[in-house]
Image (cartoon, coloured by chain):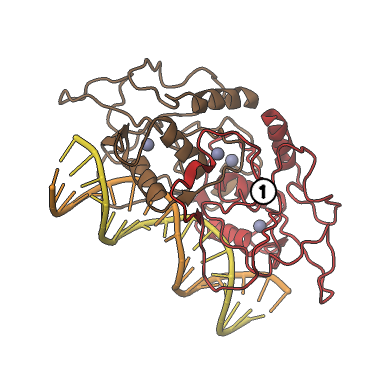
Chain colours: A red, B brown, C yellow, D orange
Amino acid sequence: MYENQVEVCAERCESPLAGLPINQTLTSSGSESPNVSRSSTPDLNTEEQVVKHSTPLNRQSGSENAYNVCAGLVYPAQLFASPNMFQFRQSARSQENRPEHFAQNRGGKPVNYCSVCGDRASGKHYGVLSCDGCRGFFKRSIRGNMEYVCKENNNCFIDVSRRNQCQACRLRKCLQVKMNRDGE
Amino acid sequence: MYENQVEVCAERCESPLAGLPINQTLTSSGSESPNVSRSSTPDLNTEEQVVKHSTPLNRQSGSENAYNVCAGLVYPAQLFASPNMFQFRQSARSQENRPEHFAQNRGGKPVNYCSVCGDRASGKHYGVLSCDGCRGFFKRSIRGNMEYVCKENNNCFIDVSRRNQCQACRLRKCLQVKMNRDGE
DNA sequence: TGAGGTCATGCTGACCAGA
DNA sequence: TCTGGTCAGCATGACCTCA
Ligand SMILES: [Zn+2]
Ligand SMILES: [Zn+2]
Ligand SMILES: [Zn+2]
Ligand SMILES: [Zn+2]
């Protein structure tokens, strides 16, 4: 169960095209292991609206005992998309109908995904199709000469919801997909 | 290798006295699996001084290619203690000579550890011996009725360096060690 | 001693202006 | 189109006051 997931992680991370391979079939986005849905592309079915700089990170329930969601219970993670510690609200753009893979938008423009985390790409950055988050992260990393150290085994899985859990592995993934300071 | 670690994690997390069991022998703090040092208690051998609210989170190297620490290389994690995304600098208090277990300070005062993460406890909070970090985290969680969702399998390992990687599991651990709103 | 409260800190990513 | 720059938003935890 868990080893299974770990294997997938390691395998993906080590491959140069780790994460969401672009131009590759994604049958309902990562359903190889049914009981461990990793939600590479969280499909928030929430209302769509762009709110500038509104970042409600974690759910706040109205009821009293709200936090028992995780209390001692073990159930398959990612039954629904969850905001991360720094999982910012997906903007309306990101919440558009996610195509199977590389589909067409309403306007006909192709939708590309970040080579690092699988989020919607905002263009090519530092030589690689990537999202604004990974772009900013890579920018800060190289400009600040940052040194990160993984607390696991340098094979943390990087996707939209987990890209902020390990900076070391996120940067490693950035470099693996050939992000570079000079934009290639 | 990794399954080993996961097993340890799960075992620790599920037990009510997960993490660093207080009053229990810690032979050099977690050396069951030699090649995967998890550094439950990171022993920073750095200089000791208390700086108020100074939180240099990540290492910034002076050299140019600093980020190659993790670039594509796979080496046992935790060769040295690393600052987390939100791993604040351990204050001088935390860097005192860490005893084997429950040892005496210079002054003779016993040193207690947080039941949640193993950091140095600042006292009893919400009924449980805990550190200021876990105290604040639990406080925010219950006051805000926060709902966290684990992105793994609800068995993330919680220690000083990783307590900020999964809020869901951190809160679960808080509840497992019987933290409660009314201080018992 | 432990409760609630405060707030400096720094990471994140959406956005902007200029090349 | 992509770059550097900006900065609102927010979780964290050290520290404070008060009972
Ligand atoms: Zn990305
Ligand atoms: Zn990692
Ligand atoms: Zn703690
Ligand atoms: Zn978890």
The location of residue A114, given as percent across then percent down, is 71, 58
D17 displayed left or right of B93: left
Mark 1, other Cα within 10 Å: few <14 / some 14–19 / many ≥20? many
Please give the name of the residue rendered at 63% of the width and 27% of the height, measured from the top-left corner: B2
Give me the residue at 39% from left, 18% from top. Answer: B26
Q: Amino acid at mark 1?
A: Lys
Q: Regarding ligand 2, which quadrant of the image does it lie in?
A: top right
Q: Quadrant of residue A127?
A: bottom right
As rendered, which of B40 and A181 lies closer to the eye? B40
Position of B167 with respect to D19 (left or right) is right
Q: Is residue B165 visible?
A: no
Residue A103 located left or right of residue B96: right
Residue B140 point in image, percent of width and height = 38, 50
Q: Chain of mark 1?
A: A
User: Which quadrant, please, contains the N terminus of chain B?
Assistant: top right
Q: Which residue is mark 1?
A: A173
User: Taking the image as drawn, is residue B14 in sight?
Assistant: yes
Under circle 1, the secondary element is: helix
